[in-house]
Image: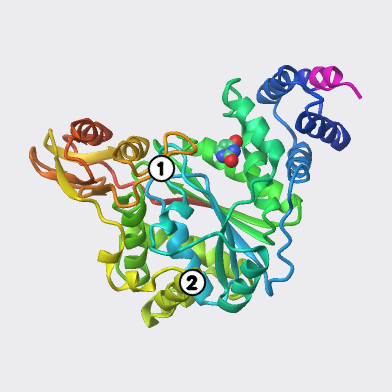
């Protein structure tokens, strides 16, 4: 086989065989196929697309390029959840103990944040003593004992995807449905789950800004998962503003705890209950989404969910007193109000911009090895649909410096304020199974 022939075939729109796709991925990972040929290949895929069979073959070839986590020592059906990335998305921290409380085994591999989106591991590490550095055996033991454990993602998960993603980033080929879908699904499948629930974000703060594109991406991932024997469901959820009110590591942990106590923001609660219900059904712990939702609501009301969170924190070395006393979590030194510079109604809050503002305060990393400040962040005080007058507090900065004029401008600039009250947008658009 020759790479040039495969590029030509894809360029002309013909579907590739599984063997041809394996040849491309293996050759690129080993270094036998150079970046310039892989760039041409990615661009050919960008324009010519891939069939479902090709997408599944590409996903599997990337899975096979690295470690494949064997979760077979864990009893029961393991269901993973993945979000395509949002700002203020603390869903995992609330959802994992919530579904574990009703018996769903959660063996979660998570990543750190890079750029303006946060990572679950950073958020959890804001809990004093909490560690994700546990051995594989201990990880499985903890899931069997408590139904829940979280570890850092193996560095060798789908290395072909890592290399290809880096190339796509500099060759204008990131935004291709078959390449995004196979990239995300390769890491999910290599992580060993039996079933997968995807939270596909749509809107100004999402990877896919338009609903129709988000639906196409969700369908592509669901098709790949199902064709590779992993029951996969996707929920399309809104990212035209950050989820909940808080953005920043320890602030997001507090908001997730509020939710498990039966408080917390309505949008976060609705998303967690919807994603959680799908997980409970996929894990065979309820026969319908409606029954699953009742189980989850009961786990919150009875305190079982919050108890599960405490057990989970203690099992991974953390100080579970934080659940009852937020002052033990990292706190920023200053609270600085951001005021509205116009009167009207909040029509949108560009989540990316809020994420970047939080990053400037120190909540996120600009480079992979940068240190983050776990106590800083932003609490939104006004969200879409609310009325504001000039001078009202729209957000509060939690900062460790008083020199935050740039961040104030960024937060003000992320708000769109209109004269007319905007129409209410749905939080959840569609479920694709
Ligand atoms: N996230 C991924 O993991 N891969 C993509 O291609 C895009 C987003």
* Quadrant of ligand 1 in image: top right
Spot occupied by residue 284 in the image (x, y as percentages of width and height): 64, 73
- Asked whether residue 297 is in view, the answer is no
Task: Determine crowd level at label 2: few under 14, some 14-19, many 20+ residues with C-alpha closer than 10 A.
Answer: many
The chief SS type of the magenta part is helix
The relative height of residue 81 versus residue 200 in the rendered view (above or below) is below
283 sits to left or right of 293: right
- Viewer-side residue, 380 vs 218: 380
**Circle on res. 198:** none
Which residue is drawn at the image coordinates 45% and 49% (left, top)?
237
Which residue position is annotated with label 2?
A: 312
| Mark 1 burial class by Cα count in 10 Å: few <14, some 14-19, many 20+ | few
At horizontal 22% and vertical 30% (from top left) the residue drawn is 406
Q: Which residues are magenta?
A: 1-9
Cα gap from disc 2 to disc 1, whole angstroms: 25 Å
Question: Residue 153 location in percent, x, y?
Answer: 60, 52
Number of the front mark, 2 or 1: 1
């Amino acid at each position: 086989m020759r790479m040039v022939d495969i590029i030509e075939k894809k360029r002309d729109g013909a579907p590739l065989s599984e063997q041809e796709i394996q040849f491309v991925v293996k050759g690129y990972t080993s270094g036998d196929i150079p970046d310039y040929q892989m760039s041409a290949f990615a661009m050919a895929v960008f324009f010519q697309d891939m069939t479902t069979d090709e997408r599944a073959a590409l996903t599997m070839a990337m899975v096979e390029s690295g470690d494949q986590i064997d979760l077979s020592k864990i009893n029961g059906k393991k269901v993973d959840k993945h979000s395509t990335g949002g700002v203020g998305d603390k869903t995992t921290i609330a959802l994992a103990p919530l579904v574990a409380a009703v018996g769903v085994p959660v063996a979660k591999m998570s990543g750190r944040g890079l750029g303006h989106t946060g990572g679950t591991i950073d958020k959890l590490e804001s809990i004093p003593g909490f560690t994700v550095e546990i051995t594989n055996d201990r990880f499985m033991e903890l899931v069997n004992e408590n139904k829940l454990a979280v570890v850092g993602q193996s560095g060798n998960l789908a290395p072909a995807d890592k290399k290809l993603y880096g190339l796509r980033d500099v060759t204008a080929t990131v935004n291709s449905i078959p390449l995004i879908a196979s990239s995300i699904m390769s890491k999910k499948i290599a992580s060993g789950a039996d079933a997968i629930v995807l939270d596909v974000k749509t809107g100004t703060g999402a990877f896919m800004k338009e609903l129709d594109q988000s639906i196409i991406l969700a369908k592509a991932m669901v098709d790949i998962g199902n064709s590779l024997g992993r029951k996969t469901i996707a929920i399309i959820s809104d990212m035209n503003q950050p989820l909940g009110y808080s953005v920043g590591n320890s602030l997001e942990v507090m908001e997730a705890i509020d939710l498990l106590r039966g408080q917390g923001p309505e949008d976060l609660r609705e998303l967690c209950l919807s994603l959680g219900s799908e997980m409970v059904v996929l894990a065979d712990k309820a026969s319908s989404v409606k029954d699953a939702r009742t189980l989850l609501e009961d786990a919150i009301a009875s305190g079982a969910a919050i108890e599960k969170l405490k057990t989970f924190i203690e099992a991974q070395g953390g100080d579970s007193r934080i659940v009852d006393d937020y002052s033990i979590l990292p706190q920023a030194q200053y609270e600085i109000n951001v005021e509205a510079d116009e009167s009207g109604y909040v029509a949108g809050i560009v989540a990316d911009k809020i994420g970047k503002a939080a990053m400037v305060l120190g909540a996120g990393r600009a480079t992979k090895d940068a240190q983050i400040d776990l106590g800083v962040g932003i609490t939104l005080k006004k969200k879409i649909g609310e009325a504001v007058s000039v001078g009202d507090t729209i957000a509060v900065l939690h900062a460790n410096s008083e020199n935050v004029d740039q961040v104030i401008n960024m937060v003000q600039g992320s708000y769109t304020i209109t004269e007319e009250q905007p129409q209410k947008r749905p939080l959840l658009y569609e479920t694709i199974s």
